[in-house]
Image: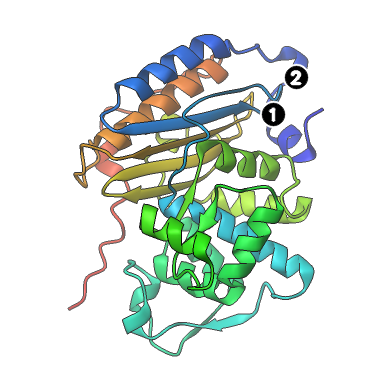
Amino acid sequence: MLSPILAAFCLTSQTALPEPNLKALEKKLDAVSISFKGRLGYHLEDLTSGAVIGERATERFPSASTIKTAVMAVAMNEIERGSLKWDEPVKLWSKDRRHASMWAYHLDEGLKINVDALIQLMMNVSDNTATVVLADRVGSETIEKTLLAWGFEDTAWTSYPPSSNARLVRLRETYANMGVTTPKEMGRLLALMARGKLVSQAASERMIRVMSHQYWDDFISWAVPPTVVTASKVGALSRSRSDSAIVFGPRPYVLTVYTDSQKDRRWVSENDGDEAIRRISALAWAAMSPQMPYSPPKDAKKWAPTGGGVEDS
């Protein structure tokens, strides 16, 4: 049986859905992974049958901003526990401590933003200042202990790791970004969310609503029709590109894709990592939803997200 969340998004009954040929799809996706100039791993789960395919799915990758999904989940858990409030105001850091970002970084010092707004900024526009402020309020050790308790041994928040936590310090030194994860573990996190089992059903539904308003929608979402709800979170470093999504098509699925050690480190839409994620997403959509063929318009990149264009005068 599908969970209430999944059932609400299905356009047809389970019995009417075509069974996807995951073996054929796996061969196509593996070919993208093997030919990539760098390291590429992916994980795909059919949320109807629970069938899974993947390549390098248990290897650790830099998470970049996709770790923000885990930070959000832990924050929601702390709210459920009563140690944090959805409407609790949190003071922004001074500018010398903020992380470069196109939104919260430019807000006045001393301003307070509540947890709800911090989560929206962190997830929807991937604001780094909002992220570190929220993570600091939740606590690095709380994030670490909660993820481990949930069974996520290869997923960690590594920004500003406590010197007393040797594991986080080591992971920070190795991956040198906000976090680390594996395609499989991030896929499992999203699958729990899709099934209403990440923190609680109400929290899962709120997280899906938040993630379905993604500003950075030019990776996995690029190859999915705009009429289909896609709850996603992207990430990008010069050495790495990543995206993680629940695609609520006729046959819902979770797809996560991560790269590392990329030869192509250009910050352009034609970056090899960007294009590989789009290609994998297109192949996945075609296999999982053959009754809804889709290709982005030829001039779609003209309207791709730009990052906001905020500039100091």
Relative to 215, say whether 129 is above or below.
Answer: below
Q: In the image, residue 188 lies at what x, y percent?
A: 63, 39
Direction right: furthest residue? 1
Q: Which residue is mark 2?
A: 14
Q: Nearer the viewer, residue 216 or 30?
A: 30
The picture quadrant where one finds residue 2 is: top right
Direction bottom: furthest residue? 110
The picture quadrant where one finds residue 138 is: bottom right
Which residue is rendered at x = 37% and y = 41% of the image? 218
**Would residue 289 be seen by someone viewing this image from the given angle?**
no
Which residue is rendered at x = 47% and y = 51% of the image? 180
Q: Nearer the viewer, residue 110 or 295?
A: 110
Q: Amino acid at mark 1?
A: Cys
Q: Amino acid at mark 2?
A: Gln
Which residue is rendered at x = 55% and y = 65% of the image? 119
**Would residue 199 be seen by someone viewing this image from the given angle?**
yes
Q: Nearer the viewer, residue 289 or 154?
A: 154
Q: Residues within 10 Å of mark 2 (few under 14, many from 20)?
A: some
Q: In the image, residue 281 lies at what x, y percent?
A: 44, 28
Relative to 13, say whether 98 is above or below.
Answer: below
Separation (CA) of disc 1 from disc 2: 8 Å
Relative to 229, say whether 137 is above or below.
Answer: below
Q: Are marks 1 and 2 in contact (CB under 8 Å)?
A: yes
Q: Which residue is mark 1?
A: 10
Identify the disc placed on residue 120.
none
In the rendered image, the quadrant that contains the N terminus is: top right
Where disc 2 sits, the SS reads: helix
Q: Nearer the viewer, residue 181 or 268?
A: 181
Q: In the rendered view, does 271 fall on the left or right side of 132?
A: left
